[in-house]
Amino acid sequence: MSYALRPALPVDFGDLAILFQASIEELAADAYSDEQRALWGGKAEDAKAWAKHLSGCLVLVAEEDGEPVGFAAMRDNAIIENVHVHPDIAFMGAGRQLLDALERLAMARGATKLAAAATDNALPFFERLGFVAVRRSTISIGEEWLPSMVMEKALAPGGDAL
């Protein structure tokens, strides 16, 4: 399936917060506790902080029938901050399409590597897209720590992933 991609606008941030929370609640249930998922999803409850986070990134939105069904964010042309899709379309290519688009943008802007702190439930996704595990890490959210893996992907200077 192919999705329409476009840059996110500030007016999208509320919808992306809802999508973010739904993605975490349903797609990360096997990897994280209820409390961990609630804290993680809670990062989008403060609209001002959420807008500040997204405004500091290049954010692409995947749409189906004019409605957001996924988004991905990249900071500093090299760090993947978010890749989230609505649970109803998980494993249908939207995440791959979003990350491929960010990769092409990063390469066009001269990046030689992408990095991501992949949550445990996202490891297989990043591995399928050519990312390699570098080291084990944690993501701090309030008083909780979510296990994660720092992943990297080398990019070829000519525009092709290595």
Image: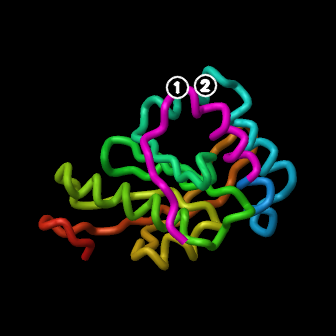
Q: CA distance from mark 2 to mark 1?
A: 5 Å
Q: Is residue 44 left or right of residue 2?
A: right
User: Which residue in the structure is indicated by mark 2?
Assistant: 49
Q: Is residue 138 left or right of residue 141?
A: left
Q: Is residue 4 magenta?
A: yes
Who is closer to the viewer here, 134 or 95?
95
Q: Quadrant of the N terminus?
A: bottom right
Indicate the position of residue 91 as horizontal and vertical percent values.
Answer: 63, 73
Decide: few, some or many residues near mark 1? Use Cα within 10 Å; few <14, some 14-19, many ≥20: few
User: Which residue in the structure is indicated by mark 1?
Assistant: 52
Indicate the position of residue 97 as horizontal and vertical percent values.
Answer: 46, 64
The quarter of the displayed image where residue 149 is located: bottom right
Magenta segment boundaries in residue numbering: 1-22
In the picture as drawn, the residue positioned furthest to the left comes out as: 158
Q: CB of mark 2 within 8 Å of CB of mark 1? A: yes
Indicate the position of residue 23 as horizontal and vertical percent values.
Answer: 71, 55
Which residue is pictured at 63% across the width and 40% down the height?
16
Q: Is residue 34 left or right of residue 57?
A: right
Provide the secondary structure element on which disc 2 rests.
Answer: helix
